[in-house]
């Protein structure tokens, strides 16, 4: 694999909505060896598999690069007026105090490892 997602087989129409999510593991869980992952959406539905990022993720920043088209962006600055189409709460982690519970909830199981 070359750390790219091939979008040649994805069809789209004008006004389709594409999204990109970057999910960081909880920072208060020092024992866990979890890495962040990135996923992509089209019209509120996940497309492809998530990509596990096994490198220094402090430097990841959102950006868009397009040619010969116009886009409207939503980086979550005003989610009340412009909510995300995709329900990002599907990627939440539930972490409990180990002395009380030993449960962690993960919802995204389709992950590529790089």
Image (spheres, rainbow, N blue to C red):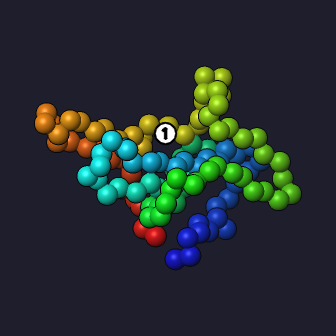
Nearest the viewer among 99 and 78 is 99
Q: Is residue 76 above or below residue 69?
A: above
Under circle 1, the secondary element is: helix
Quickly name the residue at label 1. 88
Nearest the viewer among 34 and 79 is 34
Q: Classify mark 1: residues with Cα within 10 Å, few (<14), some (14-19) or many (20+).
A: few
Seen as rendered, the residue at the extreme right is 68
Q: Is residue 5 visible in this depiction of the protein?
A: yes
The residue located at (56%, 76%) in the rendering is: 2
Nearest the viewer among 110 and 75 is 75
- The image shows residue 24 at horizontal and vertical percentages of 44, 48
- Location of residue 66 (image quadrant): bottom right
Q: Is residue 99 above or below residue 54?
A: above
Label tally: 1
Q: Is residue 96 left or right of residue 91?
A: left
Seen as rendered, the residue at the extreme bottom is 1
Seen as rendered, the residue at the extreme left is 99
The residue located at (44%, 54%) in the rendering is: 36
The residue located at (54%, 40%) in the rendering is: 86
- The image shows residue 34 at horizontal and vertical percentages of 35, 55
- The image shows residue 74 at horizontal and vertical percentages of 68, 38
Q: Is residue 109 left or right of residue 96?
A: right
- Location of residue 95 (image quadrant): top left
- The image shows residue 13 at horizontal and vertical percentages of 74, 50
Q: Is residue 32 left or right of residue 23?
A: left
């Amino acid at each position: 694999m070359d750390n790219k997602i091939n979008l040649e087989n994805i069809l789209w129409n004008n006004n389709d909505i594409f999204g990109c999510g970057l999910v960081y593991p909880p920072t208060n869980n020092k024992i866990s060896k979890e890495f962040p992952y990135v996923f992509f959406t089209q019209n509120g539905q996940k497309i492809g598999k998530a990509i596990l990022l096994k490198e220094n993720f402090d430097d990841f920043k959102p950006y868009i690069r397009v040619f010969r088209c116009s886009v409207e962006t939503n980086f979550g600055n005003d989610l009340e007026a412009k909510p995300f189409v995709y329900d990002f709460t599907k990627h939440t982690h539930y972490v409990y105090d180990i002395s009380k519970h030993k449960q962690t909830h993960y919802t995204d199981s389709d992950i590529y490892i790089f």
